[in-house]
Amino acid sequence: MCARRFLTLVFVLTLLVVAAGFAIYLWGGNILLRQATPKGHFEAARAGGAPDYANAASWLARPGLANDPALWLPDGVRSAPSGQAAIFYIHPTTYLATDRWNAPLLADATTEFRTRLFVQSQASTLNSTGRIWAPRYRQAAYGAFLLKTGDAQQALDLAYGDVSAAFDRFLAEAGDRPIILAAHSQGALHLTRLLTERKAALKGRLVAAYVVGWPVSTASDLPALGFPACSSPDQTGCILSWMSFGEPANSDLILSGWSKTNGANGGVRRREDVLCVNPLTGTAGGSAPPEANPGTLVPSQTFTSAALVAGKVGARCDQGLLLIGGEIPPLGPYVLPGNNYHVYDYALFWAAIRRDAERRLAAWHR
């Protein structure tokens, strides 16, 4: 097996494990809790020192960085002149060990490999709209999502503290450029908090925020974030959020736990309030046939490359979920129970997200 194929296979398997970590948090279960909860109590020192975001080594992607994974493109996609936006992307959980509550910035070669691949496959959707900054941060181990304990909250707070510091540096370097925000899973959780606490710095500058793979309540989260849901494809200063499911969909394992928590404004979260913005239409509650999808990111049969396949996957918002339909390409066997396509939230709509961001940036300039 050639090295490239092997690395791609590792990436696909990694997606499964990361998604499983997210699912464990949502499902619960005593055995899974014991297996996945980090050992001992939270100790900030075990994650190592805080990153210095003035140092290029503290970034996975940023302008001028050598071997920047955010500049990757699928087979057959030509590099386009970069737009003038400044993009801040927060990667999902890639640290799967249970030896500590937060990962060091450079935990190990396997975690580094996973992290760069997420930047490559997700942040790359936006590289036609501008320059991308993607910080390294002392991410919470996936087990930090399992329990509502002091240890878990401290782990999430430590991770968010790094993200917030990175955002300060990003703002300083971005100048007066329009801003696009994007994240997935744990990254999306941190992005909701960032929007809540830093919305004043984004007023008049936010093109769009892609808060993907994490539930957002229209009643108890959105008002505190300071920006509305996107209601038209050329709207700016708005939020897109979705969770992808095939049909028949069963979201009980996700939303039963989430609906028992309080939102960003302190209100109760309810299933009926989950935000769904369709990336194919750019509208909350939208619906589009497969023909409207400009490209799903699909690996080759040998897993040696990836290309865009257009016109295969349609989607419609239904009760807060983004339900996909059509002739779903062979993305891999890693669909979670309940037909949850969490692993593929970006891949399903790679070209649509790219188109959406380009359209909103053009509208912002107008």
Image (tube, rainbow, N blue to C red):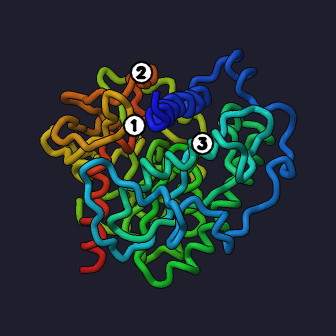
Q: Give the amino acid type for the residue marked by disc 3 in the picture.
A: Thr
Q: Which residue is mark 2?
A: 338
When asked about the image quadrant of residue 35, the answer is: top right
Q: Residues within 10 Å of mark 1 (few under 14, many from 20)?
A: many
Residue 13 spot, x, y in % from top left: 51, 28
- Of all residues, the one furthest to the bottom in this rendering is 176
* For discs 2 and 1, the disc positioned in front in the rendered view: 1
Q: CA distance from mark 2 to mark 1?
A: 14 Å
When asked about the image quadrant of residue 331, the answer is: top left
Q: Give the amino acid type for the residue marked by disc 2 in the picture.
A: Gly
**Residue in view at x 56 percent, y 29 percent:** 17
Which of the pair 16/176 is nearer the observer?
Answer: 16
Labelled disc at residue 260: none
Residue 281 spot, x, y in % from top left: 22, 51
Q: Give the amino acid type for the residue marked by disc 1 in the picture.
A: Tyr
Residue 217 visible? The answer is yes
Q: Which residue is mark 3?
A: 93
Q: Residues within 10 Å of mark 2 (few under 14, many from 20)?
A: some
Q: Secondary structure at mark 3?
A: loop
**Residue in view at x 41 percent, y 25 percent:** 335
Is residue 262 found left or right of 128 in the rendered image?
Answer: right
- Of all residues, the one furthest to the left in this rendering is 291
Residue 247 spot, x, y in % from top left: 29, 23
**Residue in view at x 50 percent, y 83 percent:** 175
Determine contact: label 2, label 1, CB under 8 Å: no
**Mark 2 or mark 1, earlier in chain:** 2
Residue 255 visible? The answer is no
Q: Which residue is mark 1?
A: 344
Q: CA distance from mark 1 to mark 3?
A: 15 Å
**Mark 2 or mark 3, earlier in chain:** 3
**Mark 1 or mark 3, earlier in chain:** 3
Which of the pair 236/354 is nearer the observer?
Answer: 354
